[in-house]
Image (cartoon, rainbow, N blue to C red):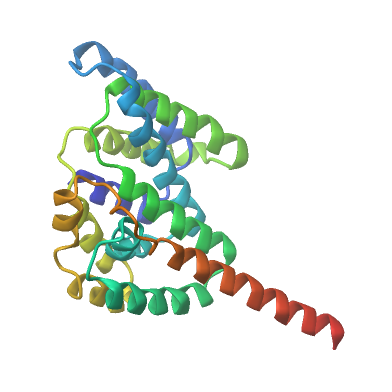
Amino acid sequence: MWILFHFIFLYFCQPSSIMHLFASVLFMALIPINTRKINTRDAVPTAALIGMYIGFYLTQELYHWAYLPWWVTTICGFRKQKIYIWAGGVILGCLFFLLTWRQRIGHCIMNVCRMLKLNEQSMASLAIAHLFMGVLFTMVGEFDMDNMYIDVLASISAVSCACWPDHMSWFSIGMVFTHPFAGALCLIHLCSPYWYHYYKNNHYRKVKYTFYFVYPVLILLGLFFREEIELAKSYIS
């Protein structure tokens, strides 16, 4: 469950992108002693891990992961959850109304990628993922050499995530306590306390012939057209 503490550390200490390069070197050093070899099954969790970091860097907040039960229930289309999906969509629409488009996109990316981050990865795939993020984020961001010890600690924390079991449900619950605003998101968990069991028992797959995944798409389209109409009115006036 170290991944929860890892992102909390990133949120409060704000290490630079160099931490990913340090983490990549550490993962490379662990490749010879890792029994799991890199293969095609690493592709999805590797992309999901990168997406989790990208979404977090876009939002700069952790409480968005507290909305994970709704995203899993909606995208997978669990049966007998229509009221929950509809009510959660209303709350999400109100939340998105207060956010910028950068934060909205980050919210979607970090939750979808967290949902897809299921399987354990080889050390080689983790090294590649952090190397990619280190190069990418260093090109678009800045880093402070004076606080390099924070980057080193963050890289060690990233490596520790591979050594501890990951439980998606507890991860999401933990994020409720990272921001006062997220207290209301406890309702998302209380109204569907067994969402992870549904997800696991359904073999982490989408239910056939369900189209609840269009709810977040409609919310984003509704906000987009509303803002475009308001913008057009401001030009006319």
Q: Residue furthest right?
A: 236
Relative to the observer, which residue lies in front, 218 or 180? 218
- Would you identify the image quadrant in which residue 82 lies? bottom left
Relative to the observer, which residue lies in front, 39 or 147? 39
Relative to the observer, which residue lies in front, 30 or 117? 117
Query: Can residue 60 be seen in the rendering of this structure?
Result: no
> Is 166 on the left-hand or right-hand side of 11?
left
Instruction: State the residue at coordinates (24%, 51%).
Output: 4
The correct choice, above or below, for 171 with respect to 3 in the image is: below
Residue 207 at x, y percent in the picture: 28, 54
Residue 122 at x, y percent in the picture: 27, 23
The correct choice, above or below, for 51 with respect to 85 in the image is: above
Instruction: State the residue at coordinates (25%, 62%).
Output: 78
- Would you identify the image quadrant in which residue 49 lies? top left
Q: Residue furthest front?
A: 209
Residue 154 at x, y percent in the picture: 34, 39
Query: Can residue 189 be seen in the rendering of this structure?
Result: yes
Q: Residue furthest top?
A: 32
Q: Name the quarter where the C terminus is drawn.
A: bottom right
Residue 18 at x, y percent in the picture: 47, 34
Tag count in the figure?
A: 0
> Is 94 on the left-hand or right-hand side of 236?
left
> Is 92 on the left-hand or right-hand side of 2?
right
Relative to the observer, which residue lies in front, 109 or 3? 109
Instruction: State the residue at coordinates (37%, 63%).
Output: 64
Instruction: State the residue at coordinates (72%, 79%).
Output: 229
